[in-house]
Amino acid sequence: MLLLVLLVVAVTLLFEGWTTHQVDAARTKPPCTRPIPRAADDGKPLLRFGPKGVTTAAMPPGTVALTFDGGPDPVWTPRLLDLLRRHQARATFFVYGKDAARHPKLLRRILYEGHEIGSYTYSGGDLGVASALRARLELSLTQTALAGAAGVNTRLLLLPHTTAADTLCGPQWPAAKRAAEQGYLVVASDYKDRKPWRGLVSQHSQTDLGYREAQDLLRDRRVQRFTTISGGLGRPSFVDAVPVADEVKGAGLIWSKKLGQAFLTVMVWTLTLAGTLGVLRMLLFTVFARLHVRRLHRYRPGAPRLREVRDPVTVLVPAYNEEAGIASTVYSLLASTHPHFQIIVIDDGSTDATADIAESIADADPRVTVIRQPNGGKPSALNTGLAHARYDIVVMVDADTIFEPEALARLVQPLAHPAVGAVSGNTKVGNRRSLMGKWQHLEYVLGFNLDRRMFEVLECMPTVPGAIGAFRRDALMGVGGVSDETLAEDTDLTMALWRAGWRVVYEQSAVAWTEVPGTLRQLWRQRYRWCYGTLQSMWKHRRAVVEVGPAGRFGRRVLLYVTLFQIVLPLCAPVVDMFALFGALFRDPVEAALVWFGFLSVQLVTAAYALRLDRERLRVLWVLPLQQFVYRQLMYLVVIHSVTTALLGTRLKWHSMKRAGTADPYLLEAPPDETRRSLQGSRP
């Protein structure tokens, strides 16, 4: 489906670019390098090529053949027709094929009022410099457009950028000969100083100047008649009716032209919308992040002094085939500075040594409990752990996550406020050595954590991440525990808490390090599941939009934000990228580059601010430009794939990720060849 859409976009852009001389341009006439043959250089404007060479003809004395090139024009063509009708005159209109397809009613009016139609090519391309393909299409598409618009063809041709016969010099002459071989009578004009009463082919544009010139000429009483080219030559019309099949073909071209114009208009608006949304998102990030920082460091008079939370905590660690990192996760939790906590590792039917490693740690430390269960999925494992929790504060941790020593104690502090039901921690990327890891590191800092600062200010936090999140046990029980109805159980749970009346906040000082996918395939599977699960959660909690109170504010704010910036914007992105590529290749590469670098500059400034807030090094910013060419497109494709899957009603299965145990933050500073401690052993 995406390839089909991109193919349609590409064809539309190329065709529109072709008609506007951006693709295979043939816009200007080159200087003449050689004159026309002597036999044709007698000043007569009508040229017919035959086996014995070229013959010329002119209007007889007292006869003027008025010709108007360009159009049909919705402004000037009706005025010219009215002028001709008042003077009972006839004329020949040399029209563009593209304008004939756009204004078929005007073309039919020209014929109905007794005038003649000639070809001015499809888009006004100079046939002398055009490629062979373009030259053929300029003529054939014009005939197709005339057939669709009025059911006629014409054998009259006026070459663009020519006036008198001697302007058919240089490459124009071979182009005129090739056209004549297809049956055209090539029409030029007489010199401007020729007296009308001597016989004249008079060429005018469909503009204000052309109107005034024709008006002055029609007042000349020495001219006996104003007629068409065929009328002046005293022969049947050069305009012929076409078979029905050609009319159908022409109608198809006209509809394609209309759809192409509409599609191009939509695409321009899409580009504008996407650019506006992108810049607006960056600005929202910066403004709300600044508000969040000021709120953290400013004491508000009258605000209650909250007690320090030192209540015991139950930590739930669901694990499935996590032998590479389970030991590091558990040991990092055991090193927490929080005074009292219980760790429950729920082995969800692992087929590796996950449970054995966790039990070996539990044998040495009574704070660790291991529960084995048949494989039932992460929500099932969390609910099992919740049933065995001894304390009223529950922290959920992914089995590939490394907690900093102070993270657990800091994470639970916002729960001192009785209205807070859940707290999101600050997730950082541990395995960021590779380019893929650096890209995801920037995404976590810029996209996720900066997002959460904004959601904190707007009071509409949509997701408490599975890697680090704290909850009130009674809040979890009040919403029925962790639901398995979606693939984004953390988003589903967070939205359910909001709708139940609880607040969800962000604690940026509670830092945990997580392992992100190391390959494109793993990244695709993970983000596909996340995006699809988010769509499921949005649909499940769609009624929050019409609810009242905090639940309604949350629903209207977060669902609008997610819809605009995480669904609509990615869906528009491939079209925008293709339009930008088209602009760089065929339109103005400098303008395209300025737009691209301008948007990149906004991203760089925002990313630098986000890194500074998270106390991260700025040197990683060098990968941001590269992110625009691979990683960003991959994320857009994930959204498109997810939306398509949702619309088709396909049920997506849970995708597990193979872990390498590289989330440990100590690995960031270690040389690549340094011998690492065993992740299944004890921490130093």
Image (cartoon, rainbow, N blue to C red):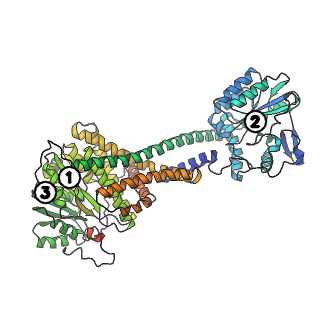
Pick the residue in front: 598 or 104.
Answer: 598
Q: Is disc 1 surrounded by few (<14), some (14 to 19) or many (20+) residues within 10 Å?
A: many
Question: Which element type, helix, strand or loop, lies under badge 1?
Answer: strand
* Distance CA(mark 1)–CA(mark 3): 20 Å
Q: Residues within 10 Å of mark 3 (few under 14, many from 20)?
A: few
- Pinpoint residue 375: horizontal percent, then vertical percent: 23, 63
Q: Which mark is residue 240?
A: 2
Kindly identify which numbered label has been placed on residue 423.
1
Q: Residue at x 25, y 39 (%)?
A: 552
Task: Give coordinates of residue 447: x percent, y percent.
Answer: 34, 54
Say which quarter of the image contains residue 196.
top right
Q: Position of residue 201 (x, y in %)?
A: 82, 33
Find the distance from the CA under tag 3 to the CA under tag 2: 87 Å
Lower sequence index among marks 1 and 3: 3
Amino acid of disc 2 = Asp
Query: Can residue 302 be seen at all in this image of the molecule?
Result: yes
Q: How many marks?
A: 3
In the image, what residue occupies the spot 27% across and 67% down?
Answer: 665
Q: Amino acid at mark 1?
A: Val
Where is residue 178? Give x, y as percent. Answer: 78, 49
Q: Which residue is mark 3?
A: 387
In the displayed structure image, the side of residue 409 where residue 440 appears, left or right: right
Mark 1 vs mark 2: which is more N-terminal? Answer: 2
For disc 2, the neighbor class at 10 Å (few under 14, some 14 to 19, many from 20) is some
Q: Distance between the Cα atoms at labels 1 and 2?
A: 79 Å
Mark 2, secondary structure of its residue: strand
Vertical arrangement, residue 3 with respect to residue 670, above or below? above
